[in-house]
Image: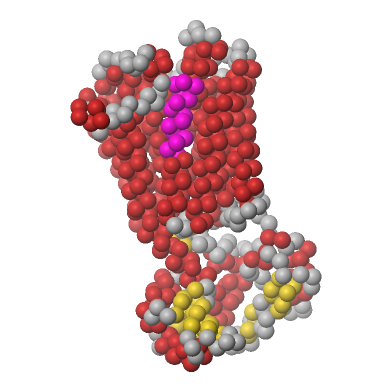
Amino acid sequence: MPGVAGVAEPVVSPDGRVAVLEVGYGVPADELTDADRAALRAAAEGPGLRVELSGDACRRRRRAPGSWRGSRFAAVVLTVTLGSLTAAGLPLLTAIAGIGVGLSAIVAASGFLTLNSDTPALALMLGLAVAIDYALFIISRYRDEVLAGREPVEAAGRAVGTAGTAVVFAGLTVVIALAGLAVVGIPVLTELGLAAALTVAVSVLVALTLLPALIGFVAGRWGRRPARARTGGRWGRFVTARPVPVLAFAVAALAVAAVPALDLRLGLPGDGTAPRDTTQRRAYDLVADAFGPGFNGPLTLVVQDADAAAAARRVTATVGALDGVADVRTAAVDDAGRTALVRVVPDGGPTSEATEELIEEIRDATGPGVAVTGRTAIDVDTSRKLAGALTGYLLLIVGLAFLLLMLVFRSVLVPLKATAGFLLSIAATFGAVVAVFQWGWLDGVGVHASGIIVNLLPVMMIGMVFGLAMDYQVFLVTRMREEHVRGAAPVPSVVAGLAHGSRVVTAAALIMISVFAGFVLSDLPMLQSFGFALAVAVFFDAFVVRMTIVPAVLALLGRAGWWLPRWLDRVLPRVDVEGRGLVDGPDGR
């Protein structure tokens, strides 16, 4: 067959009914065509034979994810929120421009660097959502300024100086959180984080430059102004009138949703976690039944010694005496006789806990002179490293959130409850992801449960959700603080803040949820779980935490919620995120 570099000797099962044949190609799997795969299947088929394919070569080119499905719903939400097709089109245009620049830079970088195949799609997912939301915030403020009687040019300047400043802060938090993934020390995670951070940064720049220019083109052709929604004010009065039961119910709901997270298992999906109707899964099951589940995930031991053959025999005897080993033998010795490969077949499958324990037992029994590798060992080690880095990264993000919010809101308790709410939404999201993708609660309705969670998901999700949570925190609570600084009592200031910002924040959250949910329809397992996780996280954080728990807590705290020690007030620099100095004067009052 064209492109085939070699064919290994077949391995036949003890009963002689199943054989495994490895075919090697001279080109990467991504360069194989459908014709190459058809030729492989045609060559293997014969009368009375059942042939199933596994491995990278049999995987077809995967279709693009469903991001633009969600953007259709986003267009509807923007039209309803802004009141005209013209105004709704601006966020979509700026999003396309920002995504185009960001993805072009990523594609250009791929010419010099080897990037993960999911990197552009993840950058597209996050960049599309934040680009639309940032433009929405600025346009909404612009329309408010025009209705207040200001000329379009002045209104655009004030919108960028107020809401645009908040966009800069919100975008900065997302960029810092995503770029901070580099501290975990895993190259693929660094690539994903930096690519997504670049796209978000471009989206912020586009919102501050291209969007005001586009506003200038369409000024005066906005159509009708939608009636201001009263839902936010009514909800604010409901929450602040009964803060204790509302707070208790919301926290209890998030806590219940977080319970499945206690069973979180990290790993990388493979043929054994593929849908049962795929040839990869059928091949995996055939091999597991005929040779044992460990045959699908053998371990490779690298032995280096002056007499590698003798050392390999000693290692084989040592490993063979361990529980959980189905087979162990020397696979190869190099021509110099100094390096040998030992092949170990575990009793358990590649993702089983027994195999993870066996890897550690082999390392303890053979010592540092023997390296344990292979895809199964690499997946286990990567998952453990990510799980170990999760706590440290979470503490870094929580600490950063507390400091940034303390600068913005000149308060100690507001940042404290904001970060506590972030932790609640993260825990509840982990629980929902485990229930759906590990326990299979939605299996059979278009969402495939692999039995494990992609090991990159928790750390990536913490970084992304942190930035998105700070968006809603800034846009809602800054208005509450402005009302309080101008003399309003604590409870009325909370109600006024919700009445002012709930419409835009609700629209922004719905847009993000729709964009992320579009990726659930993707056939890429990693993107499917990422899309679901981010959609659920935005729902929990925007509607349960920011629009329910936050106003309830502020109502309970009263004036103490805005307390800041005088010595700390003098030390902290003043950050005018909402541009109050532009509107009210240098003192912001």
Residue 575 drawn at (x, y percent): 36, 27
- Depth check: give the residue in front, 134 or 279: 134
Say which of 301 and 147 sits in front.
301
- Quadrant position of residue 113: bottom right
Q: Is residue 88 visible?
A: no
- Residue 574 drawn at (x, y percent): 33, 26
Quarter of the picture holding the C terminus? top left
* Residue 8: image location, x then y, percent: 68, 81
Give the farthest residue toward the top. Answer: 149
Evaluate whether residue 412 shows in this view.
Answer: yes
Query: In the rendered image, which quarter contains the N terminus?
Result: bottom right
Q: Please tell me which residue is depicted at 50% across the width and 57% down the height of the picture.
A: 187
The residue drawn where x is 28% and y is 25% is 240
Mainly helix, strand or loop, the magenta region?
Answer: helix
Q: How many marks?
A: 0
Magenta includes 292?
no
Q: How is the image coloured?
A: secondary structure
Q: Residue at x 48, y 13 (%)?
A: 145
Q: Is residue 569 left or right of residue 183?
A: left
Q: Look at 64% across and 17% down and name the residue there.
A: 217
Lateral position of residue 370 relative to residue 421, left or right: right
In the rendered image of this protein, does residue 323 appear above or below residue 249?
below
Query: Taking 325 as reference, is 105 left or right?
Result: right
Say if 571 sits above or below 127 in the image: above
Residue 222 % position (x, y): 60, 15
Q: Is 382 on the left-hand or right-hand side of 295? A: left
- From the viewer's side, name the closer residue of 393 and 429: 393
Q: Where on the picture, by quarter, is residue 537? A: top left
Q: Magenta region: which residues?
A: 160-174
